[in-house]
Amino acid sequence: MKYYINIATYAVDLVTALGSSHVFTLTGGMAMYLNKAVEQQPSLEAVYCQHEQACVAAAEGYAKATNFQRAGFAVVTAGPGVSNTVTSLISAYGDSTPLIVLAGQIKTADIDSFGTRTHGIQEIRSQELITPCVKTFVRLDADSFRQQLQHAITSAFTGRPGPVFIEIPLDVQGALIESSAAEIANTAEIIRRHIDKLNRSREDEESLRDPLLALISSSKPLLYIGNGIRIADQESAIIQFAERHNIPMVFSWLSFDIIPGSHPLNFGCPGGLAPIYANQVLSSADTIVFLGARLDLGTTAFQRDSFGSQASRWFIDVDSTELSKFAGMVNTRCVQANLRNLSQAISLLNTHSSQADFRWVESLIELQSDYRAEERSRLQSSTLNVYAVASALSAHADDKLFVSASSGYAEETFTRFFVPGVHTRFFNGAALGAMGMGLPNALGAAFGTTAPIMCMEADGGIMLNLQEL
């Protein structure tokens, strides 16, 4: 049965049909139709925040808590409502977090065409401000809104995921259209199929086969597992592959919870802030495959070209700009491929057996054990230091989600000593490390999972969004 709704309702209903169960929002006049649509959607729970930075940060926490498989959803008003989202959008963009932000705007006819400093009521140059901070920016119009919405939402989940920003002028929000629940459900299914089609490729399967074959053909192989593996929903596939072929694994800060710290093939997070054994493992391998890892300058201690350079290095990423950082480096090959095709690539190697040297793996286990014992004797204390706090929480980490934020003791130092348990989830704002994200990230995560949430935040960081309590 056909019925009339406005475009704001259509947009909210479509995002809800795609699986977002919660929306993080702060009401405003230029989003009045969006506000009403949020309140009237029975399958959507509105979480009313106290600041737009927190709205988007909470949406980011929600998406991360769902292992990047559902979009975080935020609705904000125009002007300062838009500008307040910038820091959180940059954080989500850097960490490849799928977000959908619906934002208000003044009427289309009132948008400044003169280049003045201020024109409409609370109007800002939103497109120029937001475009560098997101994967896709679109301003809906009443004629093309269906195609615009489909394009933007698809963009959030294809290739390297990220936030998309959909601005809806007030006249477009309130414009009546003929639609139906069946149409919205059908459109959502079309978007899902299109996302899957764009993320799947026989060519990518073949491209991924070569580095995996090089890995199992070497005597000292090493997997560097970045968060791209989690985003691609390939954690189980890569763990089973490593276990079958006895391949040691190291991780980035956003991925080190993929397996428990006690796993015999888990050798931590090498880099600028790392246990010495993790870097020794990295520097003794003869073949390293890097899967979906940015290898930022902090991780590589500003020496990206020498990070594992003694080995034959394969860098695999869906983002060509990330791969361009490694082009031309010694012992290096770059493969642009979507890691969602990894399990199919692994199946192409079912008849191959590992050449890994068991003695080398055993020596790494001994190296790690000795270092941990020495570190424990050196840092263990009856006083309340970061090592003691991290150790205590690590002992009770099973089936919990930890959000570590800000900078210094609350993030880098805590993360350095924290050891994930069974089914532990741990995330931080790895790309930006912005103060103030911890509390709204954790609050958003609480709506994306049933696991207990533990938030580690510094005194300065907690003050930036304390109002969200």
Image (tube, helix red, strand yellow):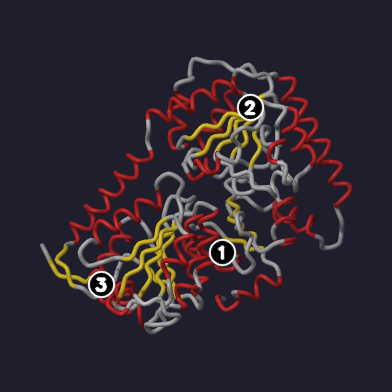
Element marked by disc 3: helix
Q: Quadrant of the C terminus?
A: bottom right
Residue extending farthest left: 1
- Residue on which disc 2 sits: 247
Q: On the picture, is 264 further left or further right than 384? A: left
Q: Are marks 3 and 2 in contact (CB under 8 Å)?
A: no
Crowding at label 2, few (<14), some or many (≥20) Cα neighbours within 10 Å?
A: many
Q: Nearer the viewer, residue 305 or 455?
A: 305
What is the spatial separation of the Cα atoms under label 3 and label 1, in whole angstroms? 34 Å
Residue extending farthest right: 378
Q: On the picture, is 176 further left or further right than 295? A: left
Residue 451 higher or lower than 332, as above or below: below
Q: Nearer the viewer, residue 98 or 343?
A: 98
Circle 3 or circle 1, nearest the eye: 3
- Residue on which disc 1 sits: 442
Q: Position of residue 318 (x, y in %)?
A: 48, 40
What is the spatial separation of the Cα atoms under label 1 and label 2, in whole angstroms? 34 Å
Q: Residue at x 16, y 63 (%)?
A: 179
Residue 469 higher or lower than 451, as above or below: below
Q: Which amino acid does the dot numbered 3 rest on? A: Val
Crowding at label 1, few (<14), some or many (≥20) Cα neighbours within 10 Å?
A: many
Which corner quadrant of the image does residue 165 belong to?
Answer: bottom left
Element marked by disc 1: helix
Q: Position of residue 338 (x, y in %)?
A: 45, 37
Numbered mark located on residue 172 in the image: 3
Q: Residue at x 33, y 78 (%)?
A: 106
